[in-house]
Amino acid sequence: MNTVIELLQKRASSPKLDAPAPTDEEVEQILRCGLRAPDHGRLKPWRFHIVQGAQLAELGHLFADIAKERGESDAKVEKSRNMPLRAPLMIVATCHPYENSKIPVTEQILAVGAAIQNMQVAISSLGYSSIWRTGECAYEEKVKRAFDVPEQGEIVGFLYIGTPTITNHAPEVELDGYVKQWIKP
């Protein structure tokens, strides 16, 4: 079987990741794969921010501050503080859409999603694992400002990257129920 096909069919997200994370050279390879994503109009609406080391804790403080402002429980505040610490490396993928373009903003956001998927496949091919998360903080203006997201832009995903702490196998998915042949009505 083609190794790319096999990799795609076996790829699974890992909710808890540990060190080691990809090296700087491997992160560059991962990002280059993201930049090769399909992009209608070649607008390149994506921006990627690397968060690692002490920056993960700083991001956790921002998440915790937002949870406090929302009046969340102490447990939720602590959980928010620890979210970035789920992995030794995070890539925050944002969309900076071109609103006056003939390409709809939705398609530009999808291009960023395709870039994230390309990066996840690259991460897996290098022997690491990842999980793509968003959550409430992705939509918070303070978080968007922290990543220089313009008013009309979006945080498309927090891509957590590292070495899986457990072997995670995604179950085989049967095509029935998800695919059917289209027949003109």
Image (cartoon, helix red, strand yellow):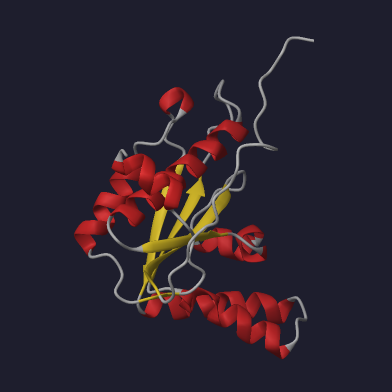
Determine the residue positioned at 57% across, 31% down: 107
Rendered-image quadrant of the C terminus: top right
Determine the residue positioned at 43% across, 43% down: 115
Residue at far top of view: 184
Rendered-image quadrant of the N terminus: top left
Percent across and percent down for residue 134 are 59, 59
* Depth order, front residue of 126/47: 126
Report the number of numbered marks: 0
Percent across and percent down for residue 173 are 58, 47
- The answer to whether residue 135 is left or right of residue 93 is right
* Depth order, front residue of 177/11: 177
- The answer to whether residue 20 is left or right of residue 172 is left
From what the image shows, is residue 15 above or below residue 138?
A: below
Determine the residue positioned at 30% across, 43% down: 3
Determine the residue positioned at 55% across, 48% down: 150
Percent across and percent down for residue 144 are 57, 58
* Depth order, front residue of 82/96: 82
Percent across and percent down for residue 104 are 60, 27
Residue at far bottom of view: 74
From what the image shows, is residue 172 above or below residue 168?
A: above
Tell me the quarter of the picture where residue 46 sits. top left
- The answer to whether residue 84 is left or right of residue 63 is left
